Amino acid sequence: MIIGDSSALVSLAVMDRLHLLEEIFDEVYVPQAVYDEVCIDNKPQSIKLKIFLANKVIKVQLDIAKIGLGQGELEAITLYQNSKADFLLIDDKRAKNFAKLNGINVIGSLGIIILAKEKGLIKSVRDDFKRLSDSSLFISQSLIDKVLKEIGD
């Protein structure tokens, strides 16, 4: 099972790779706040995400104080902690660091692509990374270059 946060889901949608989550994990869930963030009408990728996230939304009661993270990130972390999830899908650096400090297994959108390549679900990631780089999302070119070198693509 994996719990998703906004930025990583949008990144996977940009790369047309949302389906990999269902191919790699038995279950995919998002908290209501994440769904609300990514499915706003006219927001990039909102139509793809509405379709993909149908029946994957869980309402979350927050029991942690706001600590400089967004509502979606807080709900995703809480949902992870209250479930038997294997990973928290999250790209935001601050939220990822907070989650790691709290013993949460995190994976980012690039990690999903790498895992899918290792499992033979995709052959090459260059086109995916190009679509991501060409989008309005920020991704470090040095990180992309590092990952491409690491996986020999």
Image (cartoon, rainbow, N blue to C red):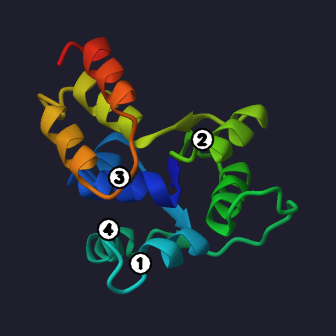
Asked if residue 21 is positioned above or below residue 107 in the image, the reply reads below
- Residue 23 in percent (x, y) is at 28, 45
Crowd around label 2: few <14 · some 14–19 · many ≥20 (10 Å): few
Q: Find disc 2 in the rendering and name its residue.
A: 93
Residue depicted at 19% across the width and 32% down the height: 125
Amino acid, disc 3: Ser
* Marks 2,4: beta carbons within 8 A: no
Residue depicted at 59% across the width and 46% down the height: 85
Asked if residue 147 is positioned above or below residue 71 in the image, the reply reads above
Crowd around label 1: few <14 · some 14–19 · many ≥20 (10 Å): many
Q: Find disc 1 in the rendering and name its residue.
A: 39
- Residue 100 in percent (x, y) is at 70, 33
Q: Which mark is residue 52?
A: 4
Q: Nearer the viewer, residue 82 or 44?
A: 44
* CA distance separating discs 4 and 3: 14 Å
Q: Who comes first in sequence, dot 1 or dot 4?
A: 1
Residue depicted at 70% across the width and 71% down the height: 60
Any part of residue 64 in sight: yes
Amino acid, disc 4: Phe
* CA distance separating discs 2 and 4: 24 Å
Q: Which mark is residue 11?
A: 3
Crowd around label 4: few <14 · some 14–19 · many ≥20 (10 Å): some
- Residue 106 in percent (x, y) is at 57, 37
